[in-house]
Amino acid sequence: MFQATNLLFIYVETPLHAGSGRGLGSVDLPIQRERITQYPLIQASSLKGRLRALAGSNQNANNGFSREEVVAIFGPETEGASEHAGALSCGDAALLLFPVRSLAGVFAWTTSVLALQRFQRTLQALALPNDFPIPPEPTDESTAWVAGEDLIAGDSLVLEEFSFNPDKSHAQKVQDIGTWIAAHALLDSSDYAYWRTALPKKLCILPENAFRDFVTYGTEIQTHIRLDPQKKTVLSGALWTTESLPADCLLYAPLLATDSRTEKTPLTAAQVLEKMRRFDRQRTQLGGDETTAQGIVSLRFFHGGER
């Protein structure tokens, strides 16, 4: 069993393409999604691979990871995979907040009671503090819980071309959730001061179906082409579309650790996660299109202690 746990928050700063391969629909290269809810996610293998690359990269030569520690924490390379398993287990990165264009306030961070309940369940499973209240589901499909006036245009909450009745019956709970997330999930540096202040004001809790539709159809679709270098025309078949999570999404992933399984590098579970927290408050790149600065994210580790 696991002896130590952390939660990793991933805040998307530039559109992120965690691809699922060739698509069968209108998008050639769709993103990874849950099968049932259709919520976007980043699969654990993708996330763990990036964390391993960070631990072993030359850029992090002074971060306290030796080659032996990388093997102990993440496991041997493929050719030696049968020797022992790594001490770190990484879960899928699940979606918590999704930005949607708003008539008032430019955009809103949207979520749903289902997404919040799953998040709180994960915190409880990891034995981490989760002292924020979750309101009941909105009373009908046209009602959304809001914290104040920042997202209201006239008497309506207008997201994309859809209008909702903004209900402030649970305004304090919405604000408390936003404040908790801002304090624990966002960077506490000066460049995030605006975002930490804005999140509690711009958070809204949507009906389940509305949130599902926004995360299904509200992602970014980018069209790519490849030109003939001589004719400067599009090459045959060189036109494709790529789906990405938009900037300002927030995801979270559980990190669980055991004591290391190799006698060469004895590490306790707590030491494993302490090593991983060297990446706390850092930026890295996830997903595809790295050479066009896509997938820049900030990382925040939550382990129940002081910020």
Image (cartoon, grey):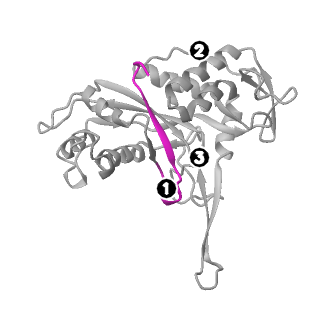
Q: Residues within 10 Å of mark 1 (few under 14, many from 20)?
A: some
- Dot 3 corresponds to which residue? 245
Q: Residue 194's spot in the image, x, y percent?
A: 62, 31
Q: Furthest residue to the front?
A: 190
Magenta stretch bounds:
286-307
**Which residue appears at 64% of the width and 41% of the height?**
215
Other-residue count near label 2 (Cα within 10 Å), few / some / many at <14 / 14–19 / ≥20: some
Question: Of the residues under marks 1 and 2, which one precedes in the sequence?
Answer: 2
Q: Depth check: 291 or 134 in front?
A: 291
- Pointer 2 residue: 133
User: Which amino acid type is marked by label 1?
Assistant: Gly
Q: Which mark is residue 168?
A: none
| Residue 276 found in image quarter | top left
State how far apart marks 2 and 3 are (Cα): 27 Å
Task: Tell me the residue at 64%/15% (across/down).
Answer: 173
In three-dimensional space, the C-alpha distance between marks 1 and 2, rounded to whole angstroms, equals 36 Å
Report the disc number at residue 288: 1
**Horizontal and vertical percent for residue 189?**
50, 31
Q: Is residue 7 left or right of residue 28?
A: left
Labels 1 & 3 near each other (Cβ < 8 A): no
Mark 2 belongs to which amino acid? Pro
